[in-house]
């Protein structure tokens, strides 16, 4: 179990509760100096960790565990340590009002000096440990006054050296048009959008949204740049604000793309709630216009709080992972784990849910060891997968 502060250090003395699939308490134990706790359980058991920082409890439950599992509970924060700077030199483009320079950690926008003149043909970025790619691909796009790319040039296989530099040479190539063709879009989808980013989600982006899409909808992007790879994100949204993303890698020079919406969408997740009286998470699902495919993981996160007679408020955040979506009774944790189960007088905060299906992952068993890390990896800018599909509950407006 990891320390709840996100350092990645072991959590010492935290409560861990093991419950067999029938609801029988197997063991409540405190983690040792290495953050470890263990118990003999039946297939389908649950494991729940309970950690506290001041007046905030963090709970995590993994359902459908098996004997022999070695699970990691808790989250390690991204490492934003600076690894140094790197400078990119590139040729001038006669009509450039600005330049966009894409590196592993994002896009730099290079504008003319305040005193006037042409925009510089050099850019320096900082590499962070969380986004390091080595060797890396660099893309430079001159833009018009509205930061719309008008050409592009790139360089691949560039090694990173702190304080180093490289020069991009050659001729700028014109921007390209890109057409995405969507089929079998159900009327439940009230809006959709397409984002194309090169060479990955940290790169140079072009996007377009469509309201009230028709069953066979085309989206045409202009001003796109080329590279070794393009990351496409197709988002489908309903009237209740439930949304789904289909993320796919495509050749960075491809001009067309096709997607059958019904064949690729997962079940929709309407707004989840907590049934405080029955201590149960209610997850409404809708399979209209979807494949009804089973995801590789399902995660629901809920928060609630209570204020005592001394006006001290305690907050609880509970994250539960399961192999498939549906209503989830909260594990019946023993009093020794703390007074953490919700009560009818608690105030419910945010409740959200997401399911994810990954083409390179066989099933829940393959990623159950560290589900938090799996969510971070496969929802990030560079997942080791060609296609990642996700369905999310509505974003709650507070």
Image (tube, helix red, strand yellow):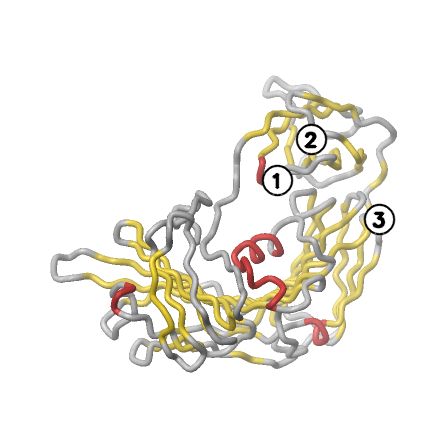
Q: Which mark is residue 131?
A: 1
For label 1, the crowd category at 10 Å Cα-Cα, with few meaning under 14, some 14 to 19 and many 20 or more, is some
Marks 2/3: CA–CA distance: 23 Å
Q: Secondary structure at mark 1?
A: helix
User: What percent of the width, then of the height, locates residue 259?
Assistant: 76, 67
Q: Viewer-nearest of labels 2 and 1?
A: 1
- The residue carrying mark 2 is 98
Q: Please say whether residue 210 is visible from this viewpoint.
A: no
Q: Viewer-nearest of labels 3 and 1?
A: 1
Q: Judge left or right: residue 174 versus residue 7.
A: right
Say whether disc 2 or disc 1 marks the residue closer to the N-terminus. 2
24 over 296 or under it: above or below = below
How many numbered badges does the structure rendering display?
A: 3
Marks 3/1: CA–CA distance: 24 Å
For label 2, the crowd category at 10 Å Cα-Cα, with few meaning under 14, some 14 to 19 and many 20 or more, is many
* Quarter of the rendering occupied by the C terminus: bottom left
Residue at 61%, 51% in the rendered image: 380
* Quarter of the rendering occupied by the N terminus: bottom left
Marks 2/1: CA–CA distance: 25 Å
Say whether disc 3 or disc 1 marks the residue closer to the N-terminus. 1
Closer-to-camera residue (99/39): 39
Residue at 34%, 76% in the rendered image: 279
User: What percent of the width, then of the height, locates residue 168?
Assistant: 80, 27
Q: Judge left or right: residue 392 versus residue 232.
A: left
- The residue carrying mark 3 is 253
Closer-to-camera residue (94/320): 320
Tell me where residue 87 sits by quadrant. top right
User: What percent of the width, then of the height, locates residue 42?
Assistant: 48, 76
């Amino acid at each position: 179990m990891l320390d709840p502060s996100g350092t990645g250090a072991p959590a010492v003395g935290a409560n861990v509760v093991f419950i067999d699939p029938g609801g029988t308490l197997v063991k409540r134990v405190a983690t040792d100096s290495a953050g470890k706790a263990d118990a003999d359980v039946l297939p389908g058991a649950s494991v729940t960790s309970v950690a506290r920082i001041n007046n905030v409890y963090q709970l995590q439950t993994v359902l459908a565990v098996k004997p022999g599992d070695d699970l990691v509970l808790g989250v390690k924060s991204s490492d934003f340590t600076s690894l140094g700077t790197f400078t990119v030199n590139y040729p001038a483009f006669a009509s450039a009002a600005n330049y966009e320079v894409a590196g592993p950690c994002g896009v730099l926008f290079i504008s003319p000096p305040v005193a006037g003149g042409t925009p510089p043909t050099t850019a320096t970025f900082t590499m962070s440990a969380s986004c390091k790619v080595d060797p890396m691909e660099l893309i430079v796009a001159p833009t018009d006054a509205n930061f719309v790319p008008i050409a592009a040039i790139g360089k691949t296989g560039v090694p990173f050296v702190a304080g180093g530099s490289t020069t991009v040479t050659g001729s700028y190539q014109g921007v390209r048009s890109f057409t995405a063709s969507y089929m079998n879009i159900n009327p439940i989808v009230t809006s959709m959008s397409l984002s194309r980013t090169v060479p990955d989600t940290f790169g140079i982006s072009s996007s377009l949204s469509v309201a009230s899409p028709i069953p066979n909808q085309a989206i045409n992007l202009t001003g796109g740049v080329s590279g070794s790879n393009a990351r496409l994100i197709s988002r489908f949204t309903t009237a209740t604000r439930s949304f789904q993303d289909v993320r796919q890698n495509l050749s960075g020079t491809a001009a067309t793309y096709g997607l059958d919406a019904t064949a690729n969408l997962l079940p929709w997740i309407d707004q989840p709630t907590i049934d405080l009286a029955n201590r149960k998470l209610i997850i409404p699902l809708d399979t209209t216009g979807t494949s009804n495919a089973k995801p590789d993981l399902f995660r629901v996160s809920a928060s609630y709080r209570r204020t005592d007679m001394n006006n001290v408020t305690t907050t609880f955040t509970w994250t539960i992972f399961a192999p498939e979506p549906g209503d989830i009774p909260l594990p019946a944790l023993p009093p020794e784990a703390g007074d953490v189960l919700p009560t009818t007088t608690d105030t419910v905060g945010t409740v959200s849910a997401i399911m994810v299906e990954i083409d390179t992952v066989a099933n829940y068993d393959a990623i159950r060891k560290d589900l938090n890390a799996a969510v971070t990896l496969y929802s990030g800018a560079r997942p080791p997968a060609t296609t990642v599909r996700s369905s999310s509950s509505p974003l709650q407006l507070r």
